[in-house]
Amino acid sequence: QVQLVESGGGSVQAGGSLRLSCAASGYVYSRHCMGWFRQTPGKAREGVAQISTMRSSTSYADSVKGRFTIFQDNAKNTVYLQMNSLKPEDTAMYYCAAAPSYGGTCYAALAPSEYTYWGQGTQVTVSS
């Protein structure tokens, strides 16, 4: 049974930091890309960051470049999202997801429709 379990959300003031974790199990972790997405009520789910679990190559949405970092611990099948310099507009439910990779390349990019497995989400609230 595939499971993606997020943790680490919470409430912080603007300028603060949070680290989200996503523990994966039940599938071949190294053959997938892992992504972080976020969603606020009434808006479409937005891709934030992605990592190739095989190559550790990463990509980011423009809105978070230079502030967020995605990284992984292969031994733990866990992906992290370090979020620094948080802004009120970063407030959202954050989800991790997995998409198949092909030779370590993440063709799924940050398109939610390309991701197969999803976690239940963790709430991040940034106050001004």
Image (cartoon, rainbow, N blue to C red):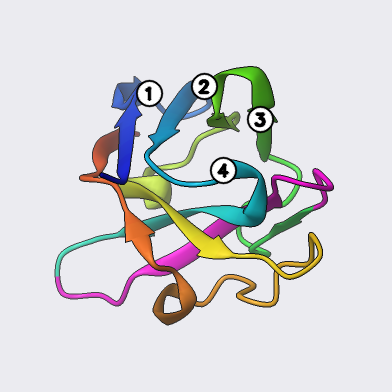
Label 4 neighbour load within 10 Å: few <14, some 14-19, many 20+: some
Q: Give the residue pinned by disc 4.
A: 29
Label 2 neighbour load within 10 Å: few <14, some 14-19, many 20+: some
Q: Quadrant of residue 88?
A: top left
* Tally of marks: 4
Residue nearest the viewer, comparing 67 with 7: 7
In this view, the mark in front (2 or 1): 2
In this view, the mark in front (4 or 1): 4
Specify whether residue 15 is in view.
Answer: yes
The residue segment tinted magenta is 42-57
State how far apart marks 4 and 1 are (Cα): 34 Å
Residue 28 drawn in magenta: no
Q: Quadrant of the N terminus?
A: top left
Q: Give the residue pinned by disc 2.
A: 17
User: What amino acid is found at the position of numbered circle 3 in the picture?
Assistant: Gln
Q: Quadrant of residue 32?
A: bottom right
In this view, the mark in front (2 or 3): 3
Helix, strand or loop at mark 2: loop
Helix, strand or loop at mark 3: strand
State how far apart marks 2 and 3 are (Cα): 18 Å
User: What amino acid is found at the position of numbered circle 2 in the picture?
Assistant: Ser
Does residue 66 lie above or below 117 as drawn?
above
**Residue at 35% in and 34% down:** 128
